[in-house]
Structures are given as C-alpha cells and as structure tokens.
C-alpha cells in the first residue's frame, strides 16, 4: 500500500496544468487573447484626457488590483497543490467554455450599455 501512495505522489509531481503544456497551451492562449485583448483596448481608450480628473485614482487602483489578481491566478494555477489530477481535460474544456462565455456576456453588456447611454 505504501508503494501505491509513493507512486501516486511521484506521478503527481510530474503533472503540469494543461494550460501550460502544448498543444493545450495554444488553445488556452488563443481563447485568453480573444477574450481579453478587446477589453484591454477598451480600458486603454476609456482613460480621461490629460488635465481632466474623473476620479481620485480609483480606476488606477482597480486596474492594478486586476493585474495583480490575474498574475496571481497564473502563479497559483501552476502550484502542485492546486493541480486537478482527475478529469483534467474535461475541466480544461469547461474552463475554455467559461472564458469564451465571459466574452459573449461582456459583449452583450457592452451592447446594452451602448444602447442605454446613446439614446
């Protein structure tokens, strides 16, 4: 029985998240960029003009917290303690679907906001 536990732990140490291994990493990064690049561009365009103060730094704080959280998620995702060992491919596909659904939900929200504010 001890051999089985040691074998399982050795196997677990060799595992990497699918998002960090090829060819799955290509799928992940394509979905990630498809989802977030338009959002990054929108946020960059929505900055106030020089000399115009819309807030007291809350937008900068929110953006900084978002970037720290995103980078932290990638770090935590690569830690051995958080690697999913069973059903890795199913969870990977579920994550991609959730990521792409977020894109469609954000697009719908943006369209609704545009209709509401441009009346």
Image (cartoon, rainbow, N blue to C red):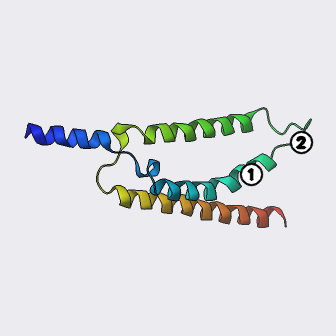
In front: mark 2 or mark 1? Answer: 1
CB contact under 8 Å: marks 2 and 1: no
- Which quadrant of the rendered structure holds the N terminus? top left
Q: Residue furthest front?
A: 22
* Foreground pick, 60 / 28: 28
Rendered position, 37 above or below 81: below
The answer for how far apart the CA atoms under marks 2 and 1 are is: 16 Å
Task: Identify the image quadrant of residue 78.
Answer: top left
Q: Quadrant of residue 4?
A: top left
**Number of the label disc, if any, that sits on residue 75:** none
| Left or right: where 65 falls relative to 57 | left
The one nearer the camera, 119 or 91, is: 91
Instruction: List x then y, in percent, for residue 75.
Output: 48, 37
- Residue 15, image x and y in percent? 33, 45
Please provide percent x and percent y for residue 83. Answer: 35, 44
Query: Left of 50 or right of it: where is 117?
Result: left
Q: Residue at x 81, y 61 (%)?
A: 117
Task: Identify residue for label 1.
Answer: 41
As helix, strand or loop, the secondary structure at mark 1 comes to: helix
Q: Residue at x 45, y 47 (%)?
A: 20
Label 1 crowd bin: few (<14), some (14–19), many (20+), radius 10 Å = few
Count of marks, rendered view: 2
Task: Identify which residue is drawn at 55% across, 38% down.
Answer: 71
Looking at the image, is mark 2 or mark 1 earlier in the sequence? 1
Element type at mark 2: loop
Label number found at residue 49: 2
């Amino acid at each position: 029985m001890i051999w089985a536990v040691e074998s399982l732990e050795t196997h677990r140490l060799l595992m990497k998240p699918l998002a960090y291994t090829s060819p799955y990493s290509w799928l992940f990064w394509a979905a990630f960029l498809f989802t977030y690049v338009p959002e990054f561009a929108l946020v960059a365009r929505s900055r106030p003009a020089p000399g115009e103060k819309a807030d007291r730094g809350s937008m900068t704080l929110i953006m900084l917290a978002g970037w720290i959280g995103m980078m932290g998620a990638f770090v935590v995702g690569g830690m051995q303690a958080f690697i999913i060992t069973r059903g890795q491919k199913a969870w990977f596909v579920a994550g991609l679907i959730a990521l792409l659904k977020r894109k469609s939900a954000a697009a719908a929200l943006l369209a609704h906001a545009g209709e509401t504010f441009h009346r």
